[in-house]
Image: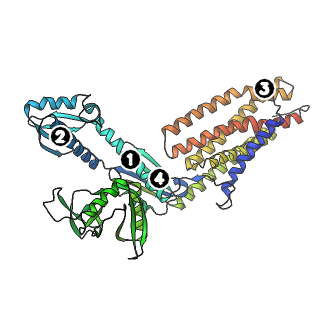
């Protein structure tokens, strides 16, 4: 029936007022809000940067092949099978083996239950293919192995990119996978895209190695340039420490030299190795190398056993802050290349907001005028309900601090259409009931009841479409699906509770009069 108990009326009013007040929170500045929540604007509305990054997996593949070569050479050595002429070329491992053992080696790789690699069970089906080239055997990643490697590399890159972005404090970043070797980064409101590009473009592979001009170094030496790309030094290939041993890194001012440095703290294993290396190599230069370039190469004056140290290199405070950030967030598994870049200026974002608001106002105004002309007093009730519906929708989005995009505004406009459609169905059904029923209350109640199935069917199918868009889509598509999905629930609430309550009040007061609709 159209009857509403006092408890239900209080509940409807309380829920409506709560979300309406929350929606008004967006009108105040941050220091005047009664709760610390608001709707965030997406990249297309407030401007910002869009970066599509591609992962260069070549170094990862090379490293995996080197590890695998070392692993299986040791494995076959334990079985008294000698591997010879081992080399890595064109992302393949080439090696020779005595003819009487060749078949045994091939079977080990082809056997799904092989113990050749404890980290990759089912070696053949998951990781590598082996080919017999006559005098040489060729080992390469299988298609499935490449997919697994790229997926793993992408997952690691995604996590480290997210850490770097979070360290900067960018508001509402959108970081997503694209394919199996790309990462999409959207940064709304970003005012310094060059800094972000610099941070994301660095692998941040940190190593500590001794400067060595002795070509007889048992680990081998290589020539590396300093960051100025002019000076260079020979350094040992032996890695004393890597960035994996860092616990923390922070920019600091060195009070003695009055220069900016990066202060770092090592974990227990790193501190022990660093202490041992510095105690036995006093007087030698220790090169601090980042992404293949020497940052600095200080001379070891004393044993450093505390696990704390400093990196100096003529840093500004900003560059020291960025280096500390890179070291804290960890090294990328592979280099990232920026293959697409777009910057949306705040003026263009404001134009989008204005265009969206104009579309919403025009559409909403036309709907209000049409409904009022068509249904008179009940059109007025519908219009009041539509306004409340929009405010409740904005209140819910505010409560969850949703990010509003231009497609999101389109979802709100569609919500208005869905709400009007539901009211039109109800009123047209009430017209049919009034032709056969003289009791206004019964006619109106029947109109609401009998139109419910059609309204629910329409809204549920739309909700299913919104859910599919949310899980299958990304970025702006998700924004559209969120506002549309939330709008469906607010529409049903406003139609069957708010509009019905206002209608029942009017009909009850005029139950003995002729009511036209």
> Disc 4 versus disc 1: distance between alpha carbons?
18 Å
Q: Whole-percent x and y of residue 478?
A: 53, 43
Q: Residues within 10 Å of mark 3 (few under 14, many from 20)?
A: many
How many circles with numbers are drawn on the protein? 4
- Discs 3/4, front: 4
Q: Secondary structure at mark 2?
A: helix
Q: Nearer the viewer, residue 232 or 473?
A: 232
Q: Secondary structure at mark 1?
A: helix
- Discs 4/2, front: 2
Q: Quadrant of residue 372?
A: top right
Indicate left or right for 242 with 132 as reference.
right
Please name the residue that numbered disc 2 is placed on.
Answer: 73
Q: Nearer the viewer, residue 354 or 253?
A: 253
Answer whether residue 194 is visible to the viewer in this image.
no
The circle drawn on residue 487 is none
Please name the residue that numbered disc 3 is placed on.
Answer: 446
> Disc 3 versus disc 1: distance between alpha carbons?
59 Å
Q: How is the image coloured?
A: rainbow
Q: Whole-percent x and y of residue 446?
A: 78, 26
- Discs 1/2, front: 2
Indicate left or right for 450 with 415 as reference.
right
Please name the residue that numbered disc 4 is placed on.
Answer: 186
Q: Whole-percent x and y of residue 131?
A: 16, 34
Tag 3 near tag 4, CB within 8 Å: no
Looking at marks 3 and 2 on the same chain, the residue that comes earlier in the sequence is marked by 2
């Amino acid at each position: 029936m159209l009857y509403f108990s006092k408890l239900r009326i209080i509940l409807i009013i309380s829920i409506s007022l709560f979300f309406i007040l929350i929606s008004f929170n967006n009108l105040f500045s941050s220091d005047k809000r009664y709760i610390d929540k608001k709707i965030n604007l997406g990249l297309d509305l407030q401007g910002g940067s869009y970066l599509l990054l591609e992962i260069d997996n070549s170094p990862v593949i090379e490293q995996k092949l080197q590890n695998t070569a070392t692993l299986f050479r040791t494995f076959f050595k334990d079985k008294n099978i000698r591997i010879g002429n081992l080399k890595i070329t064109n992302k393949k491992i080439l090696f020779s083996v005595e003819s009487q053992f060749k078949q045994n080696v091939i079977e080990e790789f082809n056997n799904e239950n092989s113990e050749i690699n404890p980290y990759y069970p089912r070696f053949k089906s998951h990781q590598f293919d082996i080919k017999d080239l006559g005098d040489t055997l060729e080992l390469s990643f299988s298609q499935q192995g490449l997919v697994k490697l790229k997926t793993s590399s992408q997952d690691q890159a995604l996590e480290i990119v997210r850490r770097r972005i979070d360290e900067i404090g960018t508001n509402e970043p959108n970081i997503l996978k694209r394919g199996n070797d790309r990462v999409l980064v959207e940064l709304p409101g970003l005012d310094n895209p060059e800094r972000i590009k610099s941070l994301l473009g660095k692998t941040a592979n940190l190593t500590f190695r001794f400067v060595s001009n002795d070509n007889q170094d048992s680990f081998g030496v290589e020539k590396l340039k300093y960051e100025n790309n002019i000076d260079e030094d020979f350094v040992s290939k032996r890695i004393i420490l890597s960035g994996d041993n860092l616990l923390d890194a922070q920019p600091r001012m060195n009070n003695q030299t009055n220069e900016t440095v990066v202060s770092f703290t090592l974990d227990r294993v790193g501190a022990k190795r660093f202490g041992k290396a510095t105690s036995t190599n006093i007087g030698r230069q220790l090169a601090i190398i980042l992404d293949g370039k020497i940052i600095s190469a200080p001379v070891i004056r004393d044993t450093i056993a505390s696990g704390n140290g400093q990196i100096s290199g003529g840093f500004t405070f900003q560059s020291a802050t960025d280096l500390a950030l890179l070291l804290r967030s960890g090294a990328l598994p592979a280099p990232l290349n920026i293959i697409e870049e777009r910057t949306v200026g705040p003026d263009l974002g404001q134009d989008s907001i204005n265009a969206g608001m104009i579309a919403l106002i025009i559409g909403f105004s036309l709907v209000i005028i049409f409904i009022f002309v068509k249904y008179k007093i009940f059109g007025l009730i519908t219009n009041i309900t539509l306004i409340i519906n929009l405010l409740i929708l904005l209140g819910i989005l505010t409560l969850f601090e949703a990010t509003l995009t231009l497609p999101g505004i389109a979802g709100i406009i569609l919500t208005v259409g869905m709400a009007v459609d539901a009211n039109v169905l109800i009123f047209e059904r009430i017209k049919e009931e009034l032709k056969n029923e003289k009791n206004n209350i019964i006619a109106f109640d029947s109109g609401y009841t009998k139109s419910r199935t059609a309204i629910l069917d329409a809204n549920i199918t739309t909700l299913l479409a919104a859910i599919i868009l949310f899980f299958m889509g990304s970025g702006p598509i998700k924004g559209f699906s969120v506002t549309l999905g939330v709008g469906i629930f607010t529409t049903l609430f406003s139609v069957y509770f708010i509009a019905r309550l206002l209608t029942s009040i009017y009909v009850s007061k005029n139950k003995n009069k002729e009511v036209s609709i």
